[in-house]
Amino acid sequence: MNASDEFDRRWQELAARARRAAEPAVVADEVQAARLAQLGLAVIRQQREAARTWRGLATAAALFLACLLGLGAAASLVSAPGVPVWTLPSTAFIPAPPHPPALASLTGGGWSPARVFSAVDAWFDPRTRTAETLP
Amino acid sequence: MGAVPDPGFDMATCVRRVGDGDQDAAQALVVHTRALVLKLVRAHRAATHSDDDLLQEVYLTMFARLHRYEARAQVPFEHWLARLAVNVCRDALRAERRRPRLQSLSPAAADQFAALQDGARRPADDAEAAREVVDALLGRLAPDDRLVLTLLDLEQRSVAEISAMTGWSRPLVKVRAFRARLRLRVLVGREPRP
């Protein structure tokens, strides 16, 4: 038997003697168990709250990125050659200005409210529109 | 894995209820597994951590990672918890620097130690003194060496059990045990004879 084996034998004998020594008893401690359970559940709650916060932040970031990407895509689309950025609103409802003769009659032939009213009425009359109307 | 078997205790249901925030289930889980965890904690022979501190650290980690266990429920809960406890204790003990000195052994323990150094001496059949020497020697080893020798030589667990608890492969357990005994031998030979 070499020195290593001899030492192992002595060590095993020592360990065997040590095994016979009384282990400290495991005393059932309800108070400690309750405290550990309470702490553990608090940890679980904290984790869930943190996870919820992270999910909210991730959702907000994802929405923000989606909006950013959507805006970028839309801008790149409308900025393509030949595609107007936006169309002008229709101005067909704006009546044409009064014809020069009407203005002349209004100013030259003497002033009266009736003539002003009829001139304004003619201004709003669609039948009096001319090619001067804006597109 | 060392836990007291309780046929009336449904572990899966208990774990699920703990996940739902049930205080009674959490307490029952602690009560049911405390003996197993305490045994593993004591096996580490912490010098600067009390058993209660390590026990609390193990349980807080267990609760924090309980959702990971639920995901792979085919592993028995006791095995999962034992492995977690071993890892928590190893992490906690890695920071320990203080090692008990062998010179402070009681006369009976010094006699046991002398017998370990010198095969010609016959030690007295004193279990308490032997325990004191074993604790002092293991306390001077690195946490992994301490763990493998405690589980193998003191608790007489099988290599397969230690492998399941630590996550080490079986050959690695054997190699670590061999190296740990070698370091132990060097440590015992380096110490002055009492």
Image: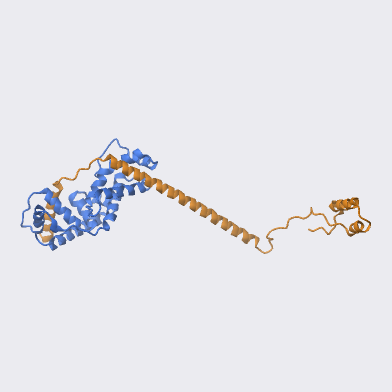
Q: Position of residue B107 (x, y in %)?
A: 9, 54
Q: On the rendered structure, is A120 left or right of B136?
A: right
Q: On the rendered structure, is A83 left or right of A55?
A: right
Residue extending farthest bottom = A81
Residue closer to the observer: A72 or B73: A72
Instruction: Say which quarter of the image contains residue B16.
Output: top left
Residue closer to the observer: B165 or B18: B18
Residue B71 in view here = no
Residue extending farthest top = B8
Residue closer to the observer: B97 or A12: B97
Q: Residue at x 29, y 40 (%)?
A: A31
Which image quadrant: the N terminus of chain A? bottom left
Q: On the rendered structure, is B146 left or right of A9?
A: right
Which image quadrant: the C terminus of chain A? bottom right
Q: Position of residue A79 (x, y in %)?
A: 65, 62
| Label total for image | 0
Q: Which chain is blue?
A: B
Query: In the figure, B31 relative to A84: above or below?
Result: above
- Figure colour scheme: by chain
Residue extending farthest right = A109
Q: Residue at x 25, y 43 (%)?
A: B35
Residue B60 in view here = yes
Instruction: Say which quarter of the image contains residue B100.
Output: bottom left
Q: Which chain is orange?
A: A
Q: Position of residue B80 (x, y in %)?
A: 31, 47
Q: Residue at x 13, y 58 (%)?
A: B103
Residue closer to the observer: B193 or A104: A104
Instruction: Say which quarter of the image contains residue A67.
Output: bottom right
Q: Position of residue B23 (x, y in %)?
A: 36, 39
